Amino acid sequence: EIVLTQSPGTLSLSPGERATLSCRASQTVSSSYLAWYQQRPGQAPRLLIYGASSRATGIPDRFSGSGSGTDFTLTISRLEPEDFAVYYCQQYGSSPRTFGQGTKVEIK
Amino acid sequence: EVQLVQSGAEVKKPGESLKISCKSSGYSFTTYWIGWVRQMPGKGLEWMGIIYPGDSDARYSPSFQGQVTISADKSVTTAYLQWSSLKASDTAMYYCARPGGSGFYEYFHHWGQGTLVTVSS
């Protein structure tokens, strides 16, 4: 089973700042099958990024994903008020699929 | 438009059985895998398993194998998650989700609204 470790656990930033979230895999994620999700309080997760760097439909271009192999990054270029949420990475290239433990982006 | 509508919140006692549902619409139900994700209170997301409604091929995470059963009924385009004997530790929000594509190795693009299951004596 691939273990995904996200860091930091919590990121305290102000609106307008840049957020950089990390996701490290215990083994190579095949074919860059890595996705990022956003979860706001009381809501279901929402897909942001798939294939490590492809934005899902309707996702603003301030969200970008990068990385390959075992190291992946989600970047939010300028935080908007609605971006303060929890973010999860997920690998879907091997069974069982696994999620990281999440990074909370909170208002400083 | 793809829609996944889950059944309502449940309150059960330990040892009871339960089956929650995920009604799908807006796409060909039998040609996409559909999965279940657990979120315990205040915790992260856990991938439980997936099913291919076309032939009811179900795959489970080792953590959930033998603990739950995933099934699907093509006639009503609905997927199910069931327990034969609930434990307090099954208290969680459960989401169904459908991948973006019809392949096996896919991310979850569409999500249900979640079903809160509370198990308490």
Image (tube, coloured by chain):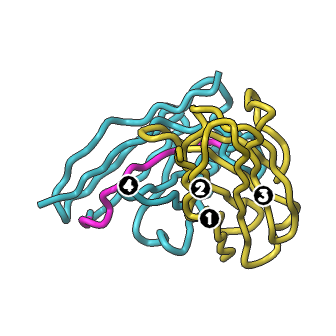
Chain colours: A yellow, B cyan
Instruction: Tell me the kind of residue under disc 3.
Output: Thr
Cα separation, mark 4 vs mark 3, equals 36 Å
Is residue A8 shown in magenta? no
Residue A8: assigned label: 1
In magenta, the rendered stretch is B87-98
- Note whether B5 is above or below B72 in the view shown: above
Residue A73: assigned label: 3
Instruction: Tell me the kind of residue under disc 2.
Output: Leu
A43 horizontally vs B41: left or right: right
Q: Tell me which residue sits at (22%, 57%) in the image.
A: B119
Dot 4: element:
strand
Q: Which sits earlier in the primary sequence, circle 3 or circle 2?
A: 2
Q: Chain of mark 3?
A: A
Residue A11: assigned label: 2
Cα separation, mark 1 vs mark 2, equals 6 Å
Dot 1: element:
loop
Cα separation, mark 3 vs mark 1, equals 12 Å
Cα separation, mark 4 vs mark 1, equals 35 Å
Cα separation, mark 2 vs mark 4, equals 37 Å
Q: Which sits earlier in the primary sequence, circle 3 or circle 1?
A: 1
| Residue contact between numbered discs 3 and 1, judged by CB atoms under 8 Å | no
Q: Are marks 3 and 2 on the same chain?
A: yes
Q: Which of the two residues, A13 or B52, is positioned nearer the viewer here?
A: A13
Q: Tell me which residue sits at (66%, 77%) in the image.
A: A1
A98 horizontally vs B22: left or right: right
Instruction: Tell me the kind of residue under disc 1.
Output: Pro
| Residue contact between numbered discs 2 and 4, judged by CB atoms under 8 Å | no
Q: Which of the two residues, A32 or A95, is positioned nearer the viewer here?
A: A32
Name the front one of labels 3 and 2.
2
Disc 4 marks which residue?
A: B82
Q: Tell me which residue sits at (43%, 52%) in the image.
A: B81
